[in-house]
Image: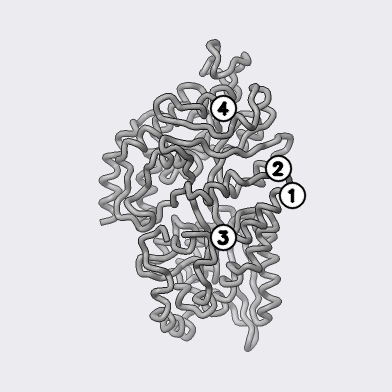
Amino acid sequence: MRGSQAPRHAARSAGLGLAAALAVTATGCGVAVGDDSVDLDYWLWDANQLLPYQQCVDAFEEENPDVRVRISQYGFDDYWMKLTAGFVAGTAPDVFTDHLSRYPEYVQRDLLLDLDSLDATAAVDADEFQEGLADLWVGQDGGWYGMPKDFDTVAVFYNETMLSEAGLTPEDLQDLDWNPQDGGSFEEVVARLTVDSQGHRGDEEEFDPDDVVTYGLASQGSGGTSGQTMWSWTAGSTGWRFTDTDVWGQEYNFDDPRLHESLDWLFGFVDKGYLASYEEVGGDANAQQQLGSGQAAMTTDGSWMINSYTRLDGVDVGIAGLPSGPTGHPVSMYNGLADSISADTDHPQEAARLVAFLGSETCQNIVGDAAVVLPARPASTDRAVEAFAERGIDVSPFTDLVEEQHTMFYPVTDQFGAIDALMTPAMDEIYIGGRDAETLADLNERVNAMLE
């Protein structure tokens, strides 16, 4: 177990009493249907996963004829606004897809049920999932608040035609490295892929950084507090970590010079002409559109975007591994989504049966065979790898990182919303060029004060 928390089953016996009480007293969104049947609401945000999860629900209903499930899918931003409104109004869905950055606050406000307090979910063995995923969802109180459903890492997506036009091959993207001093072989490739309006490349003397038509690296904005797909892989591969422990850290490390050097190097691409400026792409930059339009030749992005990139109209997209950093190997953020049960539900035991099924081998295999994400169960991950391969897509740049444990966790702490409100504007300023990365040391004191 990578986290500092006790094993999640530690609180099971204490929680069973809570479950019994909830079964008697809870009021919320589940709707009774006749004497023995109930309807449950299940929300998710990824449209790509809607079909396989509908298939999961169909299989669940066949095994559980006393429960009917209605799936609702909303875009990411709308999803969280509607969920917040639902919690306020007492109409939140019975079960919903949850994110590591959100659940600590929900736990703090008693909005989630402890899965170890419910029969069906408490019976699930956390060791059946990819290593460490279940532990990410263990709260500071020892409760278990999310059933792992998938995981994601970060790799490099590139335009195969642009790579060839630059005189490079996919093999040239293997075993790249970077460092904050001269950028290493990765910066050489980014420069080579950058082209100005006169056809001069970024590694040529005639190149004009103020007149670029194709950037070597796509922008995803500043990346905000987590920098998940934008900058976290740079700092992570220096040995830097977000907090003092893997999860539930008590101190952030935004004052670490290794982070500052990483940000300086990456956002220094703007002045070199390798990366679009904040003024050009705005705060909500879309790397997929930049790759699809030819504005950029390469980007770093998450495994949940595999289908979005490989299905770009008229663009052949390849996938390569992240470059190694000063530690001698690449490092990706390792994030995992999970299904949580709202404390508003009228039917906690039925909701637990649904959540246990969504995390089961049966459902995870359905999701794996659909080749949309990388499921949380190893055997289902293998099925997803095979399903992607049948479509000619090699996803090993994502899965190798997990197998070799070249990962770091998404920051899981209290007060993440308040921390994000402070840090994201600062990261934007660094990208814009109006703030030195070293000034994050001052903000780090304010961030850590929030955790005291």
104 relative to 175 in the view: left or right: left
* Residue ID at (54%, 63%): 129
Residue at the disc numbered 2? 311
* SS type, badge 1: helix
First in sequence, mark 4 or 2: give its number: 4
Please tell me how crowded label 1 is: few (under 14), some (14-19), or many (20+) other residues with Cα within 10 Å.
few
Q: Which quarter of the rendered picture does the N terminus lie within?
A: bottom left
* Residue ID at (27%, 47%): 446
Given contact means CB atoms under 8 Å apart, are the residues at marks 4 and 1 in contact? no
> Which mark lies nearer to you, 3 or 4?
3
First in sequence, mark 2 or 1: give its number: 2
Residue at the disc numbered 4? 216
The CA distance from mark 1 to mark 3 is 20 Å
Residue 390: which numbered mark, if any? Answer: 1
64 relative to 413 in the view: left or right: right
357 relative to 179 in the view: left or right: right
